[in-house]
């Protein structure tokens, strides 16, 4: 799980740095997208690594944790849109999609 999370941070950083060539506003918008996806994933991975006493509790923890991760991602995206009026939406969406799709790249590079 930590390999996936690390790869998310790496891909997001590359996208943000790449968009710096366009403008700093694009890079900052991409950074907002990366943080909105990778931060909840990191917290979810931390919670999963702590483990549970029973397998049934592990399934419940996973489902609740995944739900909370999605809610936290949406809340962070809304928060970024509210506090940063110069948000470039397409840059943020590119970073969000790249960061989310890095899950699949991790499995292909395995």
Image (tube, rainbow, N blue to C red):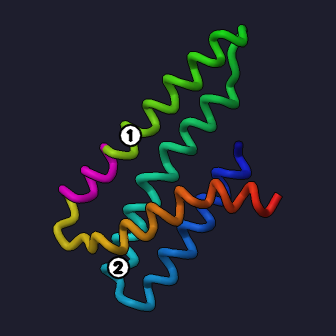
At x 23%, y 59%, the residue is: 81
Q: Which quadrant of the rendered structure holds the N terminus?
A: top right
Coordinates of residue 56 in the picture (x, y in percent): 66, 10
Residue segment shown in magenta: 75-82
Magenta stretch: includes residue 40: no
27 on left or right of 42: left
Residue on which disc 2 sits: 26
Coordinates of residue 96 in the picture (x, y in percent): 44, 61
Dominant secondary structure, magenta: helix
Please tell me which residue lies in front, 106 or 78. 106
Please tell me which residue lies in front, 53 or 109. 109
Of labels 1 and 2, earlier in sequence is 2
Count all numbered tags in the image, as a single digit.
2
Alpha carbon of mark 1 to alpha carbon of mark 2: how far? Answer: 23 Å
At x 70%, y 46%, the residue is: 2
107 on left or right of 24: right
| Extreme residue toward the right, this view | 110
Coordinates of residue 53 in the picture (x, y in percent): 72, 9
At x 68%, y 51%, the residue is: 4
Quarter holding residue 61: top right
Quarter holding residue 51: top right
83 on left or right of 32: left
64 on left or right of 86: right
Magenta stretch: includes residue 81: yes
Residue 38, placed above or below residue 46: below
Q: Which mark is residue 72?
A: 1
Residue 91, placed above or below residue 75: below
Coordinates of residue 37 in the picture (x, y in percent): 46, 52
Q: Residues within 10 Å of mark 1 (few under 14, many from 20)?
A: some
Q: Which quadrant of the rendered structure holds the C terminus?
A: bottom right
């Amino acid at each position: 799980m930590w390999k996936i999370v690390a790869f998310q941070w790496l891909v997001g950083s590359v996208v943000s740095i790449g968009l710096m060539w366009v403008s700093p506003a694009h890079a900052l918008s991409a950074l907002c997208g990366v943080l909105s996806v990778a931060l909840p994933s990191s917290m979810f991975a931390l919670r999963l690594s702590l483990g549970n006493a029973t397998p049934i509790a592990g399934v419940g923890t996973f489902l609740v944790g995944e739900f909370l991760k999605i809610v936290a991602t949406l809340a962070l995206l809304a928060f970024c849109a509210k506090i940063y009026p110069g948000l470039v939406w397409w840059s943020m969406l590119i970073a969000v999609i790249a960061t989310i799709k890095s899950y699949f790249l991790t499995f292909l590079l395995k």
